[in-house]
Image (cartoon, helix red, strand yellow):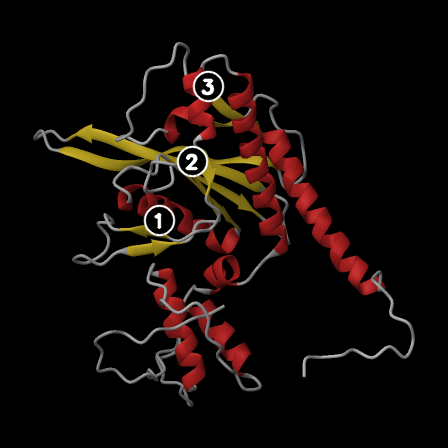
């Protein structure tokens, strides 16, 4: 739900003037105050500056929703709204399946490894959901201003401040934001976020789905200055083709257990190498198919009226 907190110091009016359209001419009618409020909030949220309030309603008059959507599309914000503000069932179900798979692999490592050190590490990794992350080391912000992000999923070591693994599920309209988000997470956490996985899925026109991975890149400049960057190690590899043709059986999303080890944590070297969580692309494709089928079944069932039937004449009693 959209929320809003007035800026601490601002002399601007709460109703901004309407920007010119693509032809360079001013709009005949300025946006209403409600539309401007919504635009201000959404712009701030995408910048990583969500308001502190948890809930606020914005009432739109007839026809204003269409105008708001048109403006969001013009500002290239509609994809962000669909991904982060609106709930898309296929997106949520698919992400939940991936989360369950990672948790299952962690449990298997904890139960089956003979090395107690590795078992302890696996049990110390927790799923953090979409909890807000405050990135204070982000170099793209001015001064001491922090950036706030809410990933689709994240996992962290219990002793780590930031998650070690971040997962973002996107679709075509948000695809170009993934690289920027990966940079925000990794640089903003000063490298504590050790891996960002981007799962790009299509909902309508195509069944193409890809996976991308970003990790920290550390090195030294020619003048001896150390640097922290971001490396895109997996670049839009398809785990499901648009024509549903088989993918190489060896293709795998690999998540090293070592990434969950925060730099500041004292950790005794295990007797055996740290294992890797491996999710073959075939199950990823199955997760997406299952999410799509589940959503289609739900929508069809609703249209066919497959639901609990009340006895004719039953009255619905609302709160007094």
Position of 184 with respect to 304 (left or right) is left
- Structural distance between the alpha carbons of marks 3 and 2: 18 Å
Tag 1 residue: 180
Instruction: Please state the horizontal and vertical placement of residue 10, each as a whole percent of the image.
Output: 22, 78
**Residue at (44, 49) in percent of width and height:** 151
**Residue at (61, 23) in percent of width and height:** 249
**Of the two numbered discs 1 and 3 in the rendering, the one whose residue sits closer to the viewer:** 3
Residue 31 visible in image: no
Instruction: Please state the horizontal and vertical placement of residue 41, each as a whole percent of the image.
Output: 39, 71
Vertical relation: 294 (above or below) 50: above
Q: Residue furthest front?
A: 320
Vertical relation: 258 (above or below) 285: above
Q: Secondary structure at mark 1?
A: helix
Of residues 70 and 196, which is closer to you in this image? 196
Q: Characterize the local packing of mark 2: few (<14), some (14-19) or many (20 or more) Cα atoms within 10 angstroms.
A: many
Q: Residue furthest left?
A: 223
Vertical relation: 269 (above or below) 144: above
Marks 1/3 in contact by CB < 8 Å: the verdict is no
Q: Secondary structure at mark 2?
A: strand
Tag 3 residue: 275
Q: Which mark is residue 213?
A: 2
Q: Quadrant of the C terminus?
A: bottom right
Marks 1/2 in contact by CB < 8 Å: the verdict is no
């Amino acid at each position: 739900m959209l929320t809003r907190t007035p800026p601490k110091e601002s002399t601007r009016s709460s109703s901004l003037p309407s920007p010119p359209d693509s032809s360079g001419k001013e709009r005949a009618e300025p946006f209403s105050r409600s539309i401007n409020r919504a635009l201000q909030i959404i712009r701030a949220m995408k910048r990583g500056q969500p308001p502190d309030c948890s809930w606020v309603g914005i009432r739109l008059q007839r026809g204003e929703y269409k105008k708001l959507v048109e403006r969001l599309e013009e500002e290239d914000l509609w994809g962000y709204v669909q991904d982060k503000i609106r709930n898309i069932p296929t997106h949520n179900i698919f992400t939940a399946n991936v989360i369950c798979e990672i948790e299952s692999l962690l449990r298997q490592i904890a139960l089956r490894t003979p090395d107690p050190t590795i078992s302890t590490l696996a049990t110390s990794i927790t799923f953090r959901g979409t909890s807000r992350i405050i990135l204070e080391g982000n170099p793209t912000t001015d001064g001491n201003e922090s950036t706030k992000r809410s990933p689709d999923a994240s996992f962290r070591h219990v002793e780590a401040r930031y998650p070690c693994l971040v997962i973002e599920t996107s679709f075509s309209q948000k695809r170009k934001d993934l690289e920027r988000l990966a940079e925000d997470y990794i640089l903003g956490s000063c490298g504590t976020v050790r891996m960002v996985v981007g799962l790009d899925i299509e909902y309508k026109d195509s069944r193409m789905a890809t996976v991308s991975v970003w990790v920290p890149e550390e090195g030294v400049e020619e003048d001896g200055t150390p640097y922290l960057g971001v490396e895109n190690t997996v670049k839009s590899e398809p785990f499901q083709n648009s024509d549903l043709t088989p993918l190489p059986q060896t293709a795998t999303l690999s998540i090293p257990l070592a990434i969950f080890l925060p730099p500041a944590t004292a950790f005794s070297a295990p007797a055996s190498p740290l294992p890797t969580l491996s999710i073959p692309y075939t199950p990823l494709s199955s997760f997406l198919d299952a999410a799509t089928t589940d959503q289609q079944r739900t929508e069809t069932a609703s249209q066919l009226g497959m639901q609990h039937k009340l006895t004719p004449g039953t009255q619905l009693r609302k709160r007094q």
